[in-house]
Image: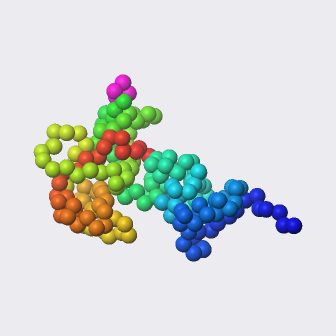
Amino acid sequence: MIALPKLLLIDAIAERPFDAPLFQQVRAAFAGPILLVTADLDLCCAAADEVILLEAGRIVQRGAPRAVLDRPASVEIARLLGIPNLFQGTIAALDPARDSSRVDFGPFALSGPYIPGHFRGDSVRVAVHAEDLRVHSGDLESQPNFVSAQLVGVSHRARFVRLEFPAGFSPTSPARNSRARRKISSGRWSFPPGALHVL
């Protein structure tokens, strides 16, 4: 009698496309640990208890899927995850009592939560997910974290369209929402303070 395996390895990169419903079927048939190799971040979020990011054969970050995707540990990992908004800035203000900070990026400055372990004048890199950016109309110049910009380019993806602006930031829009893209060809964008992640 052949013993049941203690570990199941699924290479979803080399094999045919592997999706969440198929993974659930495998999970129902096999109760042991499963090691799934994939570049599909949506599948990772849907199926995994833990994500291990590999680059050039070495582990660069591991943890719960949302924790890894929302809070990359370095600029290289943010790039590996496809986060387009990576800014080099200088810490202009730190206020631990009010849990706030301000980072100057040259053409614009952004406020966010207090950045522990840093000092005023330190150079930092900040990552912002494209889907966290918001467009607004009207006069909001006096409000924090608003940047005025003119659309300069559009990059089509499978499920969304990436919009490109001269300030160096890229939000996303649903692929079929051309009316919304016309509306935001020029506008004021907000960076929610909680969306700023210092690397």
* Image quadrant where one finds the N terminus: bottom right
User: Which x, y percent locates residue 74?
Assistant: 48, 50
Q: Quadrant of residue 11?
A: bottom right
Q: Quadrant of residue 175?
A: bottom left
Label the magenta part by its dominant secondary structure.
Answer: helix
User: Which x, y percent locates residue 57?
Assistant: 62, 62
Q: Residue furthest top?
A: 97
**Residue pictured at 38% horizontal, 39% vertical:** 122
Q: Is residue 35 magenta?
A: no
135 vs 43, left or right, is left
User: Which x, y percent locates residue 90?
Assistant: 33, 42
Range covered by the magenta-colored residues: 94-98
61 vs 174, left or right, is right
56 vs 164, left or right, is right
Placement of 13 over or under 123, stated as above or below: below
Q: Is residue 95 magenta?
A: yes
**Residue pictured at 64% horizontal, 66% vertical:** 10
**Residue pictured at 40% horizontal, 45% vertical:** 197
**Residue pictured at 57% horizontal, 75% vertical:** 16
Q: Residue furthest right?
A: 1
Q: Taking the image as drawn, is residue 95 in sight?
A: yes
Q: Quadrant of residue 183?
A: bottom left
Q: Taking the image as drawn, is residue 57 in sight?
A: no
**Residue closest to the eye, 78 or 8:** 8
